[in-house]
Image (tube, rainbow, N blue to C red):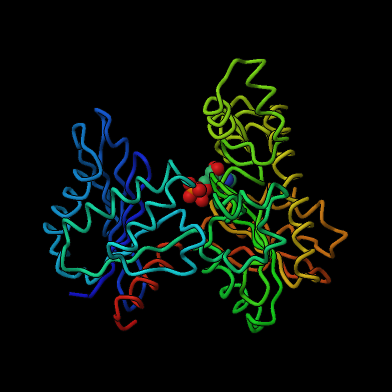
C-alpha cells in the first residue's frame, strides 16, 4: 500500500477531497461532496477512471467525511493515509506559511474568520471533523493568503486611517497563494531561468480570478485585497467598483450592507454583465454565435485583466514572463488572445497556433518569436498542499 496524503478543501456547502501518493504526488482517488445541508446532498468519488455517486440525505460536512472514510475503507485505502492537509482561505497576518494543526492554530484560524466569514468557518468544520475521525494523524493547514505576506506595506495598505490596520487588520491580503506558489517555480523551470532572477506576472483565472506580480519567487503585489472581491471581473464577483456604490445602492434599492455585498459577490461579474452565465465556456460559445451581451462581458473581463497585468509590471520594474493558469487561463484561447492583444506595448504577442494548442491540460509557451515569453501552466493546488503536509508531518517525499 502506497503511503498517501489526504487533501481536504471545505466550502460552505461542499467538501472536495483528493488522496495523493506521497512519492509521485499524483491523485489516486478524489471527489466532491456537494449541497451539504440540503435534501439532495450527495458525494461523488473518482478512482481508477470510474465515477461513483452516493446520496447523503440531508447530510452535513461530518456525514460527508464519514462517507469518505467508508469508501476509503471499502477500497482498502484508509490505512495508506499518513497525514491530512486542509486548504484554508484566510490566515490573516499570523500565518506566513503552512502550519501543523493544534489548538493554538485552530484558535488563530477562528480569529481570522471575521475576515473570511464564508470560508474559514467551513474550513474549521472540516478540520474539526477530520480531527475527530483521524485523531492520531498529523494534520496541516495551508493558507491561500500566506504567499502574499511578502508584499511591502505600500502595496498592502489601503489609504484609510492607519488605525484601522493596527486595530482591525484592514489591509490587502491577497488570495490564490497556493496556486501561485506552485506556478512560480514551474514557470522558472520551463523558462530555464533561476526563480530568484525571474520577474513574472501570473494570472490565476477560475471562477475567482486574480493576478500577481512575483519577483524572485516572492509576491510583490496582487489584485485581490481584504477579501477575494477586489480586482478582476470574475464569474459572479464584480471586482473593483467605486466604494461609493454601497451608499448609492443602499439608498436607491433600499438594500442593507449585506444585500449590496451579496449583489457584488453573487450576481455580478460575467453573470451580471451577460445576464446569461458565469461560465466562461458558455459565454465564449454565445459570443461566437453573435450574442452581444456575452461579447461585451468577455471584453470587460479581458480589458480589466490587461489593465491589471500592465499595472503589476510596476512593482517588478521589468517583465520576464506572463503566465496564465486556472480553468480559464488554462483553457480559454479566446480570452488569452483578447488580453495579450491589448499588451503589445509591453512586448507581448501570441503565436495563434500555439495558443489554440494549449488547452485541456496541454501546457507550454504560446508567444510568437520576438515576443516576451507567455506561458500556460496547469496549476495543482492539491499537490502543493500535499507537499506542505508531508514536509510538516516529517514524511519523506
Ligand atoms: P474554480 O475557481 O472554481 O476552481 P476553475 O479554475 O475550475 O474554477 O475554472 C472554472 C472556469 O474555467 C469556468 O468559467 C469555466 O467555464 C472555465 N473553463 C473551463 N474549461 C474551459 C474551456 N475549455 N474554455 C473556456 N473556459 C473554460
Observer-nearest of 119 and 13? 119
155 left or right of 93 in image: right
Q: Quadrant of the N terminus?
A: bottom left
Q: Position of residue 60 (x, y in %)?
A: 24, 39
Q: In this view, does 75 lie above or below 45?
A: below
Q: Quadrant of the C terminus?
A: bottom left
Q: Where is residue 273 in the image (x, y as percent from the top left)?
A: 66, 29
- Can residue 30 be seen in the rendering of this structure? yes
- Can residue 28 be seen in the rendering of this structure? no
288 left or right of 84 in image: right
Q: Where is residue 371 in the image (x, y as percent from the top left)?
A: 81, 68
Q: Looking at the image, which residue sits at the far right? A: 345
Question: How many numbered callouts?
Answer: 0
- Identify the residue at horizontal 73%, vertical 70% (top origin): 373
Q: Position of residue 352 (x, y in %)?
A: 74, 57
Q: Is residue 268 above or below residue 225?
A: above
Observer-nearest of 386 and 245? 245
- Identify the residue at horizontal 76%, vertical 51% (top origin): 306
Which quadrant would residue 257 be assigned to in this image? Answer: top right
- Identify the residue at horizontal 60%, vertical 69% (top origin): 150
Observer-nearest of 377 and 361? 377
Amino acid at each position: 500500500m502506497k503511503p498517501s496524503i489526504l487533501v481536504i478543501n471545505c466550502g460552505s456547502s461542499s467538501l472536495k477531497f483528493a488522496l495523493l501518493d506521497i512519492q509521485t504526488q499524483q491523485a489516486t482517488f478524489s471527489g466532491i461532496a456537494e449541497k451539504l445541508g440540503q435534501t439532495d446532498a450527495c458525494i461523488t468519488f473518482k478512482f481508477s477512471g470510474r465515477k461513483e455517486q452516493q446520496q447523503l440525505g440531508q447530510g452535513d460536512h461530518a456525514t460527508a467525511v464519514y462517507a469518505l472514510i467508508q469508501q476509503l475503507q471499502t477500497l482498502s485505502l484508509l490505512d495508506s493515509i499518513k497525514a491530512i492537509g486542509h486548504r484554508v482561505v484566510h490566515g490573516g497576518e499570523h500565518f506566513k506559511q503552512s502550519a501543523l494543526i493544534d489548538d493554538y492554530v485552530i484558535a488563530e484560524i477562528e480569529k481570522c474568520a471575521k475576515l473570511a466569514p464564508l470560508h474559514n468557518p467551513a474550513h474549521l468544520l472540516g478540520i474539526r471533523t477530520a480531527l475527530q475521525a483521524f485523531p492520531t494523524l498529523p494534520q496541516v493547514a495551508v493558507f491561500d493568503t500566506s504567499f502574499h505576506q511578502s508584499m511591502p506595506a505600500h502595496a498592502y495598505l489601503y489609504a484609510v486611517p492607519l488605525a484601522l490596520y493596527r486595530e482591525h487588520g484592514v489591509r490587502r491580503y491577497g488570495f490564490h497563494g497556493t496556486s501561485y506558489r506552485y506556478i512560480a517555480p514551474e514557470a522558472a523551470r520551463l523558462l530555464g531561468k533561476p526563480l530568484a532572477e525571474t520577474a513574472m506576472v501570473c494570472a490565476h483565472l477560475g471562477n475567482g480570478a486574480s493576478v500577481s506580480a512575483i519577483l524572485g519567487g516572492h509576491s510583490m503585489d496582487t489584485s485581490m485585497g481584504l477579501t477575494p472581491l477586489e480586482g478582476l471581473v470574475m464569474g459572479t464577483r464584480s471586482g473593483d467598483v467605486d466604494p461609493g456604490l454601497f451608499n448609492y445602492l443602499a439608498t436607491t434599492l433600499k438594500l442593507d450592507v449585506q444585500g449590496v455585498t451579496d449583489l457584488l459577490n453573487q450576481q455580478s461579474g460575467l453573470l451580471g454583465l451577460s445576464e446569461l452565465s458565469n461560465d466562461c465556456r458558455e459565454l465564449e460559445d454565445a459570443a461566437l454565435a453573435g450574442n452581444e451581451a456575452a461579447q461585451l462581458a468577455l471584453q470587460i473581463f479581458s480589458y480589466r485583466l490587461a489593465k491589471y497585468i500592465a499595472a503589476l509590471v510596476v512593482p517588478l520594474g521589468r517583465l520576464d514572463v506572463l503566465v496564465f493558469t486556472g480553468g480559464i487561463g488554462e483553457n480559454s484561447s479566446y480570452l488569452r488572445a483578447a488580453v495579450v492583444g491589448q499588451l503589445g506595448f509591453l512586448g507581448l504577442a501570441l503565436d495563434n497556433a500555439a495558443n489554440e494548442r494549449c488547452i485541456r491540460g496541454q501546457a507550454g509557451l504560446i508567444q510568437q518569436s520576438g515576443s516576451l515569453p507567455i506561458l500556460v501552466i496547469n496549476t495543482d493546488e492539491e499537490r502543493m498542499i500535499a507537499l506542505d503536509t508531508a514536509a510538516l508531518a516529517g514524511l519523506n517525499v
